[in-house]
Image (spheres, grey):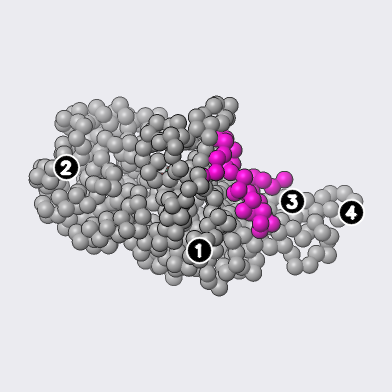
């Protein structure tokens, strides 16, 4: 991908965790690849915790370099990358400091990108301060999640930012949309005629979408305890995946065609009746347990977490979509921390044959199943029944396997790298539009409210397992089970 679009990339929160682990490494990868970033493009880091550019570059050497790809760092590329970086020391609480930022960037070339890798409470003050020195013109602004805490607070941020930046200038990040396999899902669905006729209620029995993590809350206990899995993973990543799985074919891949179709799905989600929440939603919290041979502590004893916390670290939901394509097909969504494995996958269970001439074993729902593994080891696996060799007609499950790294050995791109290049090049398709975000908040809110008001604590599960038994019981009511429970 060759580009000549010059840019000035202003990174607020320049010494934060996200800058260290994701943003600066992704910019470095794009720089190293050559041809992706205009030579004249500059990165202007904004932070408080460094005195000057030299000190900041020292921090980058010490903290960012270890996070760039596993391959040995190309020293020449690293040195030329550092040459792109400028530094401005600003106290974000002090709007007058933004004059220095204006002075630093006003003669730099190209489109200005302001990346807010800060807490959401700073989004609005930063936007006001940018506008006060005229920096909102000819600019793009990138907002990291979490964008708000509920519909009301997210609207308040969007309203305030929207007074300063037009919607086409606003890039709301959901890094799942930048993942290669999620892009591939669009290719699978809309580049092949094969799946489309089957991708509907007549042929699909149920769909599961899982994002399971082995990690706990790490150093983010304080943030997480005020957030929980529903806000952290479901409102954004899981509902975005769901909308891509369920959307109608878009007219084109331009940003609004794709986002319009996703929005239609989000708006068609069957509203959850608070009286049914016990039947369609399971919340859990991990207790101590063992993961890959290591003992890990209970959530409630993690640093920053209240000992009597009722924050959920696990969510399983049954979701329905009220439209002709999907009416009556349950979508089971699940995410959790400290689960038995790190895996993100989509499982499409097809219906059983309507009549079997081959005996009862062919009448199994899910005998035909498509498993789209998003991470790790991206792959697509199509399960079928085949005759076992030998006498008689005995059927066994077999599968066709497509492991992407065997086909495409080079060229994989990290989510953040793709998304940052999209911002620099003005491509909005992989960013969440305000109306999508609102629809997602609106749908999750009854669950949030009910859980907040509930005196029942989340269901406990031992770390290293697949979550509370209630999540399995919910699927059993639909005569199905989670993929790992098969066999
Ligand atoms: C983030 C959440 O958005 O996604 C984290 O805040 C979570 O809690 C992370 O760990 C998972 O992302 P990935 O790319 O590691 O699956």
Q: Residues within 10 Å of mark 2 (few under 14, many from 20)?
A: few
* Distance in Å between CA atoms under marks 4 and 1: 51 Å
What kind of element bears circle 2? Answer: loop
Label of residue 165 in the image: none
The residue positioned 58% from the left and 57% from the top of the image is: 279
Q: Are marks 3 and 1 in contact (CB under 8 Å)?
A: no
Label of residue 273 in the image: 1
Residue 249 position in % (x across, y down): 49, 68
Residue 358 position in % (x across, y down): 83, 61
Q: Are marks 4 and 1 in contact (CB under 8 Å)?
A: no
Q: Which residues are magenta?
A: 458-487
* Distance in Å between CA atoms under marks 3 and 1: 39 Å
* Front residue of 263 and 217: 217
For residue 245, above or below residue 60: below
Dot placed on the residue nearer the N-terminal end, 2 or 3? 2
Dot placed on the residue nearer the N-terminal end, 3 or 4? 4
Q: Which residue is mark 2?
A: 93
Whether residue 308 sits left or right of residue 465 in the image: it is left
Whether residue 59 sits left or right of residue 279 in the image: it is left
Dot placed on the residue nearer the N-terminal end, 3 or 1? 1
Q: Nearer the viewer, mark 4 or mark 2?
A: 2
**Does residue 165 show up?**
no
Whether residue 452 sits left or right of residue 195 in the image: it is left
Q: Residues within 10 Å of mark 4 (few under 14, many from 20)?
A: few
The residue positioned 65% from the left and 62% from the top of the image is: 205
For residue 457, above or below residue 429: above
Q: Which residue is mark 3?
A: 397
């Amino acid at each position: 991908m060759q580009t000549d679009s010059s840019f000035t990339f202003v990174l607020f929160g320049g010494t934060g965790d996200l800058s260290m682990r994701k943003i600066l490494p992704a910019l470095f990868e794009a720089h190293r690849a050559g041809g992706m970033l205009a030579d004249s493009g500059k990165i202007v880091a904004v932070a408080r915790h460094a005195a000057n550019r030299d000190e900041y570059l020292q921090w980058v050497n010490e903290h960012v370099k270890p996070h760039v790809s596993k391959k040995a760092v190309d020293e020449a590329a690293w040195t030329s990358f550092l040459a792109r970086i400028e530094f401005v020391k600003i106290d974000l609480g002090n709007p007058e400091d933004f004059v220095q930022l204006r002075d630093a960037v006003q003669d730099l070339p190209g489109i200005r990108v302001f990346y807010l890798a800060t807490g959401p409470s700073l989004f609005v003050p930063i936007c006001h301060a940018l506008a006060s020195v005229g920096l909102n013109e000819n600019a793009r602004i990138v907002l990291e999640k979490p964008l708000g805490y509920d519909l009301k607070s997210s609207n308040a941020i969007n309203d305030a930012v929207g007074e300063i930046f037009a919607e086409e200038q606003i890039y709301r990040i959901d890094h799942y949309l930048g993942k290669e396999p999620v892009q591939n899902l669009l290719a699978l669905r809309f580049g092949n005629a094969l799946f489309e006729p089957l991708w509907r209620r007549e042929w699909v029995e149920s769909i599961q979408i899982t994002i399971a993590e082995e990690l706990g809350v790490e150093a983010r206990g304080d943030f997480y305890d005020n957030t929980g899995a529903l806000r952290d993973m479901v409102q954004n990543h899981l509902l975005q995946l769901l909308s891509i799985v369920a959307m109608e074919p878009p007219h084109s891949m331009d940003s609004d065609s794709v986002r319009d179709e996703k929005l239609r799905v989000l708006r068609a989600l069957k509203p959850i009746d608070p009286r049914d929440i016990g039947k369609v939603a399971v919340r859990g919290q991990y207790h101590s347990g063992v993961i890959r041979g290591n003992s890990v502590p209970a959530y409630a004893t993690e640093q920053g977490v209240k000992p009597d916390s009722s924050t959920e670290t696990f969510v399983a939901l049954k979701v329905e979509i009220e439209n002709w394509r999907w009416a009556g097909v349950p979508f089971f969504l699940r995410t959790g921390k400290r689960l038995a494995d790190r895996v993100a996958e989509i499982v499409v269970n097809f219906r059983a044959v309507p009549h079997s001439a081959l005996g009862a074993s062919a009448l199994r729902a899910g005998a035909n199943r498509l498993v789209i593994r998003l991470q790790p080891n991206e792959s697509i696996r199509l399960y079928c029944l085949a005759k076992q060799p030998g006498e008689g007609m005995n059927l066994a499950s077999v599968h066709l396997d497509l492991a992407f790294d065997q086909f495409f050995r080079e060229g994989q791109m990290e989510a953040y790298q793709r998304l940052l290049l999209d911002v620099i090049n003005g491509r909005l398709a992989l960013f969440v539009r305000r109306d999508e975000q609102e629809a997602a908040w609106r749908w999750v809110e009854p669950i949030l409210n009910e859980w907040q008001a509930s005196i029942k604590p989340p269901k406990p599960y031992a770390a290293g397992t697949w979550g509370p038994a209630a999540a399995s019981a919910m699927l059993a009511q639909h005569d199905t089970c989670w993929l790992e429970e098969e066999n």
